[in-house]
Amino acid sequence: MALKIWLDGKLVDQEEAKISVFDHGLLYGDGVFEGIRVYNGRVFELEAHIKRLYESAKVIRLVVPMSRSKLIGAVEKTVEANAVIDGYIRLVVTRGTGTLGLNPLICENSKLFIIADNIQLYPEELYEKGMKVVSATTVRNHPLAIPPQVKSLNYLNNILAKIEALDNDVPEAIMYNHEGYVAEATGDNVFIVRDGVIYTPPAEAGSLEGITRGIVIKLAKEEGLEVVEKNLTRFDLYICDEFFLTGTAAEVIGIVEIDGRVIGDGKPGPVTRLLRKKFFEYAHGKKL
Ligand code: PMP
C-alpha cells in the first residue's frame, strides 16, 4: 500500500514525496533524524524523541522548520493517515537545498519529512536464542568531532562498523571509543550484568543517549536491580554473565557471544529476559 508522507507541512502520496538532489542532507549527510515506535496506535515516548531532535538540530545549528507542538501534531497525523497500529516512524530534518559547496548557511529551507511504516529489525528467533556480535575496529566518533549524542544523518562511522559485523556473519558490532572503552553498538546501547549488577557505559563514553536505555534503567531499578553507569572495556564484555542491547528498533535483545567468547550459558540470561518482558509491558501501556 502506498504510504502518505508528511513533507513541507502536508501529507502527500509516497510517489510525490521528493527531495532535491541539491539537498545537503543527501549531498553531505547534513541533517538530523529520529526513529520512533508506535505501539497499540500510541506514539511511544514522542516528547523525548522530539526533545532529542531539537537538541541534535541545535548542536549542528539547524533550524527545525516547525514548533514542537506542531511537530508532535504532524507525527500523530502521519501515523493516523497510514493507520499504523504497531510500527515505526522516521522523522528527518535536512539542511535543505543548497549548492555544490559545503556552506550550510545558503541552503534555502530546511526540509522536514515524516514516514510512518512498519519495521522488523531482527527475526523473532534471534530474540529467543540471542545474538552474536563482534568488536568493531572502527572507532566511535571522537567527542570533539560530531558529538556521538547527536543523531545526525551522517552514520558512516556506524555503517563501517556494521559492515565489519556483516563481514563476520553476525548482525551487530560493538564500537569502542578513542580510549578503548565500550561506546555502543551500531544502532543500540550496551548493557552487561555481572554478579547481579547491571552496568552500562555513560553517554560520555561515546554513545547516543538512548531513550530505550533510559526506560530500561528505570524499569531495572523498579525491579530492585542495581544499575551502574561506568566505563567498560572489552574484558568486561568477555567475562560478563549477561549482555544485552537496547534501542527503539531492537527493543531489548540478548547477546550470547562476542568475538568467539560465549556469554553465560549461551542463552539470554534471566535479567535480560525479565527486562525484555518489562519493556514489552511498559511499551504496550500495561504500567510503569
Ligand atoms: N545508538 C545509536 C547510534 C542509535 O542510532 C540508536 C537509535 N537507533 C541508539 C543508540 C538507541 O537509542 P534509542 O533507544 O533512543 O532508539
Image (cartoon, grey):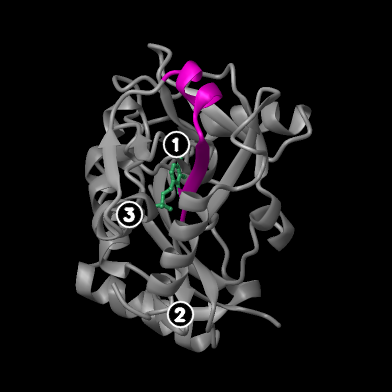
Where 282 falls versus 107 (above or below)? below
Q: Going from the N terminus, do you reach mark 3 or mark 2 first?
A: 2
Amino acid type at mark 1: Ile
Rounded to the nearest whole Å, what is the CA distance between mark 3 and mark 2? 33 Å
Instruction: Residue 188: give x, y in percent of width and height.
Output: 48, 44
Instruction: Report the residue marked by disc 1.
Output: 192
In the image, taking residue 273 as reference, residue 150 lies left or right, namely left
Q: Foreground residue, 128 or 124?
A: 128
The mark total stands at: 3
The residue at 35%/77% (across/down) is 74
* Callout 3 secondary element: helix
* Callout 1 secondary element: strand
Instruction: Report the residue marked by disc 2.
Output: 78
**Segment tinted magenta in the rendering:** 233-247
Instruction: Residue 271: give x, y in percent of width and height.
Output: 46, 51
- Label 1 near label 2: C-beta < 8 Å? no
- Kindly report which numbered mark, 3 or 2, lies closer to the viewer in this rendering: 3
Where 10 falls versus 51 (above or below)? below
The verdict on residue 46 being magenta is no
Amino acid type at mark 2: Thr
In the rendered view of the protein, which quadrant contains the N terminus? bottom right
Q: Going from the N terminus, do you reach mark 1 or mark 3 first?
A: 1
Instruction: Estimate how packed mark 1 is, as few (under 14), some (14 to 19) or many (20 or more) residues with alpha carbons within 10 Å.
Output: many
Amino acid type at mark 3: Ala
Instruction: Report the residue marked by disc 3.
Output: 220
Q: Which mark is residue 153?
A: none
Q: Foreground residue, 226 or 41?
A: 226
